[in-house]
Amino acid sequence: MSEKNCAVILAGGQGKRMKSELPKPMFEVLGEPMLEWVVSACEKAELTDLCIVKGYNAEVIEDYIGDRYTTVLQPQRMGTGHAVMMAVDWLKERLEGNVLILCGDAPFIDSETITASLEQHKKQGNAVTIITAKVGDPTGYGRILRGDNGVSGIVEEKDATSEQKRIREINSGAYWFRTESLIKALGEIKPNNSQGEYYLTDSVYILINQGQRADAYISSNPDVVLGANDRHGLLRLNDTARYAVIDRLMDEGVEFLCTDGVSIGRNVKIGAGTKILQGTILRGNTVIGKGCVIGPNCVIENCEVGEDVTLNSVQAYDSKIDDGAKIGPFVHIRPDSHIMAGVKIGDFVEVKNSVIGERTSISHLTYVGDTDVGSNVNFGCGVVTVNYNGDKKFRSTIGDNAFIGCNTNLISPVKIGNSAYTAAGTTITKDVPDGALAIERGELHFKEGFGKERLKNRNKK
């Protein structure tokens, strides 16, 4: 039979000290659930036969994983060994391979460690290979005991002697097992402890006592051991991940004047020579080109940003911004917008599901929604595209070189022609031909003395 390698990810934990109804693996690091970090590491290592063990508030895990991978339920949390037992039927269909056991709340496992530890596991013919790391301060972790022929055991800190406490190689909680050997060992684990739980570490001792070989792979990434049991730990995970991303980007030529409030997702790509200012949050699959200035105080999510773009106090989502655009401050770019090259957008402007043509200027206090705008258009202050009638949304078009006067209301759907002009304060309800001036103003009337009488009480103050 051909070898079938798989992974079981333990994601049933409650995390009581988090004081939340959210399962612990669903707490986020750099905007992604810890569980997703673990799943993506497996995928990057081309390990895509996964089983997720859910437990506390299982519906949250189910909804997140969807139909991507198999899930099994651990109805009662009775230890790590018990969690793996829930996947035994799934594992029995994969007896001829190896299984990787991972913790869904230890996000920094990496694909290189997964691949290299499997190679060692197979090369040495191990029944179990423990993924470990050497750290400066091993306090609180299980220590790895080594013998003449691999690992002889794991000792928890509370049970360790003074000499054993000086061991710096610690257990990450991740293991490669020969699948058939693990299933047999799980059947022999007993809850002989004060907690009445089934510990997965006991399977290591069972396999060693059966004369099977156990060894450890020391990861070059010491962060594989890191997890979070409370909000303090979660903050440390976020800081660790945040600075790792920033360090990588600086090596790639990205400039940071100050990292206060800067948070950049691990999948974000930024070109050399771009400057990131304080308070900038970049998330999702955002791509930013060379020579940009991003910040201060920007939130950019799932956007494609070209080169030499300036974004100042901008929030942009699921949109495209082309080369040379200058946007901000206090601008909101909502999903499905395309800001083309050379566009200038000033303060307090919102753009939604619209195309803004090259070199167009939207200076301030304007809403552009569901509109296709041509090139070299000028928007005055206070322009509104009235795209929603309370029931349906409608789309408008503005031609090249048009001039939209201050406080113009465009009642969609309308078309403003090329080089057309709308006078300030005009409400447009019909298409405007190319080159025409649209002006709509009622006759101005005066009622003498009205203001003096109406405001007489206020004027006395």
Image (tube, helix red, strand yellow):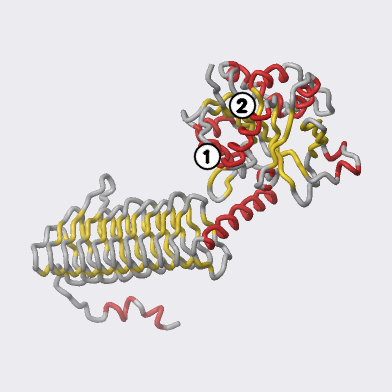
x 26%, y 66%: residue:
383
**Closer-to-camera residue (5/157):** 5
Residue 51 placed where, x, y %? 56, 27
State whether residue 384 is above or below residue 222: below
Inter-mark Cα distance, 1 to 2: 17 Å
Q: Where does the image place residue 66, in percent across and percent down from the top left? A: 48, 31
311 lies left or right of 52: left
> Closest to the observer: 105 or 185?
185
The residue lying furthest to the bottom in this view is 460
Q: How many marks?
A: 2
Q: Is residue 18 visible?
A: no
For the residue marked with disc 1, what is the amino acid? Ser
Label 2 Cα neighbours within 10 Å, binned few <14 / some 14-19 / many ≥20: many
Q: Residue at x 45, y 67 (%)?
A: 273
Q: Which residue is mark 1?
A: 40
Q: Going 40% across and 78% down the picture, which residue do you hit?
A: 457
The residue that disc 2 covers is 99
Q: Secondary structure at mark 1?
A: helix
Task: Choose between 173 and 16: the one closer to the eye.
Answer: 173
Q: Amino acid at mark 2?
A: Val
Question: Which of the two marks, 1 or 2, is nearer to us in this view?
Answer: 2
Q: Quadrant of residue 228?
A: top right
**Residue 392: % across, % down:** 25, 45
Quarter of the figure that contains the C terminus: bottom left
